[in-house]
Amino acid sequence: MRILILSANTGEGHNSTAKALMEVFAQQGVDCQMEDTLAYLNKGISKLIAGGHVTIYRYCSKLFDITYRRMEKDMDPEEYSPIYEFLSLGTTKLYKAIMQGDFDAILCVHSFSAMMMTRIRRRWGLKIPTYLLTTDYTCWPTSEQCDVDYYFLPSKDQAAAFIRAGHSRLQLIPTGIPVRQAFYHREDQSLVRQRLGLPQAGNVVLLMCGSMGCGPIEGVARALAEKLPKDAMVVAVCGSNQKLYHAMSQIQNPRLRVLGYTKNIPEYMDAADLIVTKPGGLSSTEAANKALPMVFLNTIGACETRNFDYFLSRGYALGSSKPEEVVALAVQLAADPRKRQQMSEVLQKDFCINSAQVIVDRMCKDGAAYRESQMAAAVR
């Protein structure tokens, strides 16, 4: 069996979701390949879009938010958007690659990929089982331009929005957002702290702002380190933002540990008592599966505001768009073990499924059925 996962080079969250699934496919001996669909337009265009996305995300978040909200208002399943027409320019190359790859199922982890697959399915009548996996707790405004077989949703709560976007309820499969297997298990906190060289006593607050290190993380880190109890420790992760890492490394405070890019996020989550982070779909789900109490800093907006609203409305997190309020909420939560326990219990109850395994099982089942139908047709 061969599986194709189509991502888009617009941030690491989509790619991380794809890699979480590839991890499980590999464990089951399934051949799985990931491709950047934007590269089928042009590799230079892919790099340009990726670079532009990082710049807007880090420095022009209000523009990103305004554009997203405008797209939400203009949703129309009957009208093709300029984005759809632009992406269609790369579909011939992508179709040829799919045919050469002899795949049994195709998963899109970005709506751009699903839009390209929609054009391919309509133009060439491709019958390979195709899916769109939503990696935010909302219906993306470009989802109405997608026509695939099934849609993997973060939860059943997004179903109504997908139906309004023109999709059938029978196509909607609530699976949760898949994360790496390390996030589905918790290690003993004291052992992890010892391994990471963190203090055994006192609160450990993990501070993250995505793989790109977005938002006013430096100011929040300084304020937390000053206002938390003296035995507390703040671990700030700057991701790929080297400029931010260099600036924060100059802060002289023994209660602040600054990290750049690290693969040890599951361990740091196990060591922490709470996390302060932006409400990205993937990072929120990682923390939720660790049952780690969250305080959201919602400064990016766009789809992250939908994640923010969803998590706060269900008691999964606290949060604000104002850094000073976020600091106050984090300090209060650090001093309230009962509240943290309540939040953990809610998360443990509602995030209790290994979403990656569920999606892999479904795709393998459908892929096997497709392969059998193709073999049967060849015999006739």
Image (cartoon, rainbow, N blue to C red):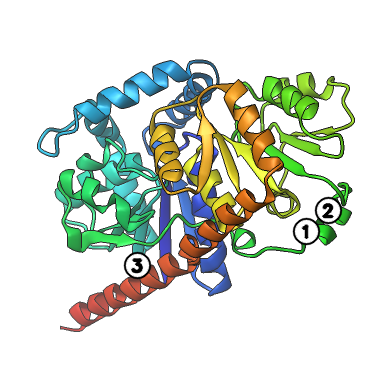
Residue 40 visible, this angle: yes
Q: Mark 1 points at which residue?
A: 189
Determine the secondary structure under disc 1: helix
Mark 1–mark 2 Cα distance, whole angstroms, equals 6 Å
> Which residue is tagged 3?
104
Front residue of this view, candidates 200 and 167 = 200
- Could you tell me the amino acid type at mark 2? Arg
Q: Give the x, y percent position of residue 370.
A: 27, 73
The N terminus sits in image quarter: bottom left
Q: In which quarter of the image is the C terminus?
A: bottom left
* Residue 20 place in picture, x, y as percent: 54, 57
Query: Sequence-wise, which precedes: disc 3 or disc 2?
Result: 3
Quadrant of the rendered structure where residue 180 is? bottom right
Q: Residues within 10 Å of mark 1 (few under 14, many from 20)?
A: some
Query: Residue tagged by mark 2?
Result: 193
Tell me whether circle 3 and circle 2 mark residues in contact (CB < 8 Å). Answer: no
Q: Distance between the residues labelled 3 and 1?
A: 42 Å
State the image coordinates of residue 134 (x, y, percent, origin top left). 37, 48
Which residue corresponds to the image point at 85% horizontal and 50% vertical from the top-left? 196
CB contact under 8 Å: marks 1 and 2: yes
Front residue of this view, candidates 211 and 375: 211
Say which label, 3 or 1, has the lower sequence index: 3
